[in-house]
Amino acid sequence: MNQKAGTILRLFRTGDGFISGEHLSRELGVSRTAVWKHISALRKDGFRIEAVPSRGYRLLSSPGNIEPHEIAAGLVGSRIGNRLEFNKVTVSTNADAFHLAEEGAAEGTVVLADSQSGGKGRRGRIWASPAGVNLYCSVVLRPAIMPHEAPQLTFLSAVAVARAIEHTTKLTPEIKWPNDLLIAGKKVAGLLNEMSAETDGINFVVLGIGVNLNMTARQFPPDLRQPATSLLIESGAQVDRSHFAVIMLNELDRLYSDFLRHGFAPVREEWQQRCNARGRRILVTDSGTECTGGMFAGIDSDGALLLQTDDGQLQRITCGDVRIL
């Protein structure tokens, strides 16, 4: 797909109903004949586009592919997506993004893949990454913050994904500390941030984002540690992967720009409002053995979980698995 076709798709997404050939011609700066050629090419790629005399064109359905040109055409932020890399198959988008960052890739570089052979989650756990169904994405950031503040970006990316799910479906996700998104108590997305830093500052952070969009129940591994789901399973409708990527990356850009201007407090507030443990009693298990119970009391400025224990003490927890009691 070329850039003009990507722009046509963006106009379809943001428009309401039919778009005239004249309007497309004007927006693209090409002839009506050239518009028709781009429409024909999109149809060959699997897009169902209706053409009605005197009304124009209307997008009926998409093939569900990751379309880099469409994503690039839909990004409106000032930072995220200034460079977009797409691989049909890769070991890990995080590894790709980390390598690019080490070579000097600019802040806002985005790496996407159709599938991963070595996708991973927190604590080295496997992240199932089949082709043609999900979003696998990593973003390079270079914030002027101290290394101990880097976990704040995990919470920022969780809010961005939650907003994108709400924009593209009728579902209401919850966030589980520290880096999972849930729907009906089942995991639908995970985040894995990796960092290169010195004692006095950060070189870069890679935000790794995996969202189960169109996986079916049979595509999930049988040995998952916790129940998993997808937006397709929960909503009953396919999610356009490119459109979801555009919404999520635009939300990420908005949140990151606000973060650089106003700090972590606004992100922290929204994250806590979306947290599944808000106002509830929880049990935190570390390494599968040590357990601590109490009331969820939010997160602190470093993203650590705050737990009010039964004796009234406020305990700060930096790692572990949370279970609602």
Image (cartoon, rainbow, N blue to C red):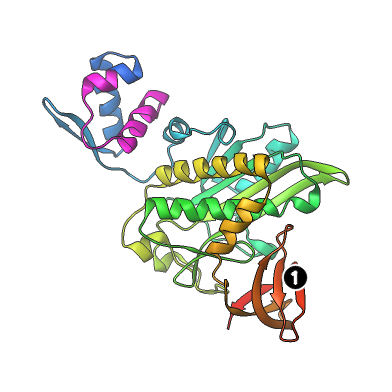
In the image, what residue occupies the spot 56% across and 57% down?
A: 270
Q: Is residue 172 left or right of residue 150?
A: left
Between 129 and 198, the residue placed more toward the observer is 198
184 horizontally vs 277: left or right: left
Is residue 180 visible in the rendered structure shown here?
no
User: Does 196 appear in magenta?
Assistant: no
Q: Residues within 10 Å of mark 1 (few under 14, many from 20)?
A: some
> Where is residue 154 shown, x and y percent of the image?
65, 54
Residue at 33%, 28% in the rendered image = 8
- The answer to if 6 sits in the magenta stretch is yes
Q: Which residue shows up at 38% across the image and 23% down it?
A: 4
Q: Is residue 204 above or below residue 228?
A: above
In the rendered image, which quarter is residue 18 located in?
A: top left
Q: Nearer the viewer, residue 123 or 318?
A: 318
Extreme residue in the right direction: 199
Percent x, y of residue 35? 27, 21
In the displayed orientation, state which residue is furthest to the left.
53
Q: Main secondary structure of the magenta part?
A: helix
Residue 57 lies, with reference to residue 205, above or below; the image says above
Residue positioned most to the front: 312
Under circle 1, the secondary element is strand
Instruction: Work out whether residue 270 or residue 239 is closer to the camera in this orientation and state it.
Output: 270
Residue beneath disc 1? 317
Q: Position of residue 169 (x, y in %)?
A: 37, 55
Q: Quadrant of residue 179?
A: bottom right
Q: Residue at point 38% right, 28% down? A: 7
Q: Is residue 165 visible?
A: yes
x, y percentage for residue 1?
39, 30
| Span of residues in magenta | 1-25
Q: Is 128 in front, or is 242?
A: 242
